[in-house]
Amino acid sequence: MVPLLTYHSKMRFARDILLRARIAAALGFVFAQAGLLRAQTPVAVAGIVTDSSGAGITGAEVSLVGKDAKARTDEAGKFKLSVPPGLVTLSARRLGFLPETRQLQFKEGDIAAQVEIRLATVPTTLKPVVVRSNRMKYTGRLAGYYQRLEANNGGYFITREQIDRANPRNLTQLLTQAPAINDRRMRGGGTGVRMRGRQCSPLVWLDGLPMGAGEVDLDAFAPQTIQGIELYLGSTTAPMKYISNRDQSSCGTILIWSRGPDTDPPRRSLVTRVDLEKLVSSLRVYTPDQVDQPASVDVSSLAIDYPPSLYASGTGGSVIAEFIVDTSGHVEEGTFGIVSSTDPLLSDAVRKAIESASFQAAKLKGSTVRQVVQQPFSFGGRPKKKG
């Protein structure tokens, strides 16, 4: 006969073994699920879809092939999409462009990635309208600045485009990138600059008004609010109207020009408010390859004003505009949009020109029809001076 104590001990031992086995199985399941979840953590893809010039394309659809995941690009051509790790294929498509795919490989543990997808225009896209100007008449408060910037003699210029590209923390950081400019800490805090190693502070003017004699805390001016800067190192190199007296001007002169309504285009969305792809698929609107005679712009009616700030700095660029031309040769209201652009000032110049331009309506089997138009524009900058 087995002693009672020994029997109970064996039963408890068996129950302990069974309980431990169940706990181990449960923990194993939990750890397995955790590993599965970790392996399936999606990768955050931040991308951009661009045209042949490198400008972002608005309204392109980016999808994950084989999955129900897609995104639309914003006005800068950017998109965000979550994709699983492993080998994935992204597809980008947009009316007027050839579709493109990109294969990407992500390993377990990848969290984020960046990608650029470049689309080529379809062969039926219209030839670019080339915008040039042999002469610019500057007006307004910045006329003198633009004239001196175009002439580009006697001073060192920092343009808005350079400021935005550098994206400096403060104005001193930006100025010290110019030759012969050094920073200097002020006694009461703040930062000033010195030109050509001089010990005295330069004269500072803001929008044509003197900031007064003595040190000026330049970091009080946010770089993102500045349209342009002129630096004159000598006592006689600055424009005559900005020379106070010989002693003060001998320390150098800084002219700062601020941004404002006259330097920035109106804040408005330049994305078409209608679904052009849906209209095309329903055959209510045609594309150039679907008609016998595509719609075309009357170039003589196209008056484009080259943005003064871009012309003065010799900056070119490109724009692709999109709209519907109706059967009477007019742009349908609410259909104008910008597909891609290298500068918002150029976009606004194209918008104003298209709104007042005349078009030849498209024809199909002898009848005029509505057609979606994608018109490229090329801004060549100002002509280079000879010699």
Image (cartoon, rainbow, N blue to C red):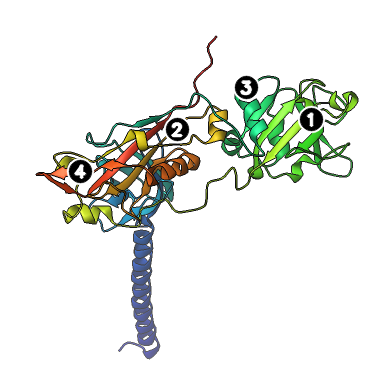
- Between residue 195 and residue 105, name the one nearer to us: 195
- Please, which residue is most extreme toward the left here? 365
- Residue at mark 2 to residue at mark 1: CA–CA distance: 33 Å
Residue sitting at x 82%, y 32%: 203
- Residue wearing tag 1: 242
Q: Nearer the viewer, residue 299 or 180?
A: 299
- Please name the residue that numbered disc 3 is placed on: 151
Q: Nearer the viewer, mark 4 or mark 1?
A: 4
- Residue denoted by label 2: 317
Label 1, secondary structure: give it: helix
Q: Going from the N terminus, do you reach mark 4 or mark 2 first?
A: 2
Marks 3 and 2: in contact by CB < 8 Å?
no
Which marked residue is nearer to the observer: mark 2 or mark 3? 3
Does residue 18 appear left or right of residue 327 in this picture? right
Image marks 4 and 2: residues in contact by CB distance under 8 Å: no
Q: Is residue 152 left or right of residue 60?
A: right
User: Alpha carbon of mark 3 to alpha carbon of mark 1: how far?
Assistant: 17 Å
Question: Above or below — where is 308 with respect to 363?
Answer: above
Name which residue type carries label 4.
Ala
Q: Which residue is mark 4?
A: 362
- Which tag, 2 or 3, sits closer to the chain's start? 3
Number of other residues with Cα within 10 Å of mark 3, as a class: few under 14, some 14 to 19, many 20 or more: few
What is the spatial separation of the Cα atoms under label 4 and label 1, in whole angstroms? Answer: 57 Å
In what element is the residue under mark 2? strand
Identify the amino acid type marked 3.
Ala
